[in-house]
Amino acid sequence: MGRQPKNNQKIWDAVRMIAAAKGHPFSAAHVAHYTKIPYNSVKCYLIGLTRAGYLRAQVRNDKPTQYFLERDVGVDAPRVLRDGTETTNGRVNEQMWRTMRILHDFTARELAVSASTEDTQVSISSATTYITHLRATGYLRIVERTKKGPKGTSARYALTRYRNTGPKPPHACNDGTVYDPNTDRIMEVTAR
């Protein structure tokens, strides 16, 4: 996952700001300059947004591709792949984060069941992985260790009060860190 969620959110914020303030087209170079995100990352996300119908591209032989904001869906960056398909990757985390903020405490199984909806099911494996990342970066604390049969012990977790940072779900990155879009900070591993 790397820094993609953070970058895509910054790109989307810039697209919305530029489109609202200027009311005219923008280029990938303009967004890259504004956000300080590498041009290729910006271009890739803009292509995905265009193919998904959020942007309209105007290609001219003598100028760089110009983009127009066609569908503004609010502050949360659309989750699209380069081919324009929507990804549900973040929906599971959104559901788990929202559920964690509501429940007093929970096990991985309880989180998976409570966070699941008809449209998006949360597996126990996904809940366990997300819990592991959030615990390692100080978002969760163990409130009780419980017996879980022959495989060893399980635990009940609770959200750490000072890390209940807002409505947007923290994103677990491949390097073990967690990006928190509520604070725009990268949280390092503090515990294992």
Image: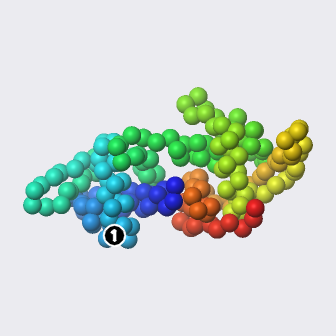
Q: How many discs mark residues in the rendered view?
A: 1
- Percent position of residue 58, x then y: 17, 51
User: Which quarter of the rendered picture does the C terminus lie within?
Assistant: bottom right
Is any part of residue 98 visible from this angle?
A: no
Is residue 166 shown to the viewer in this render?
yes
Lateral position of residue 48 relative to residue 129, left or right: left
Residue 85: x percent and y percent?
39, 40
- SS class of the residue under badge 1? helix
Q: Is residue 18 above or below residue 47?
A: below
The vertical placement of 69 against 124, above or below, is below
The residue lying at 75 percent from left, 38 percent from top is 109
Disc 1 residue type (three-letter): Tyr
Q: Which residue is mark 1?
A: 34
Q: Position of residue 7 (x, y in %)?
A: 44, 61
* Residue drawn at the location 58% of the way across and 67% of the way down: 186
Residue at horizontal 68%, vertical 56%? 134
Q: What is the quadrant of residue 147 in the picture?
A: top right
Asked whether, in this view, residue 112 is left or right of residue 183, the answer is right
Taking the view exactly as shown, the residue that stands out farthest to the front is 150
In this rendered view, identify the residue nearer to me: 129 or 134: 129
Horizontal side of 144 relative to 182 (left or right) equals right
| Residue 49: x %, y % from top left | 34, 48
Q: Residues within 10 Å of mark 1 (few under 14, many from 20)?
A: some
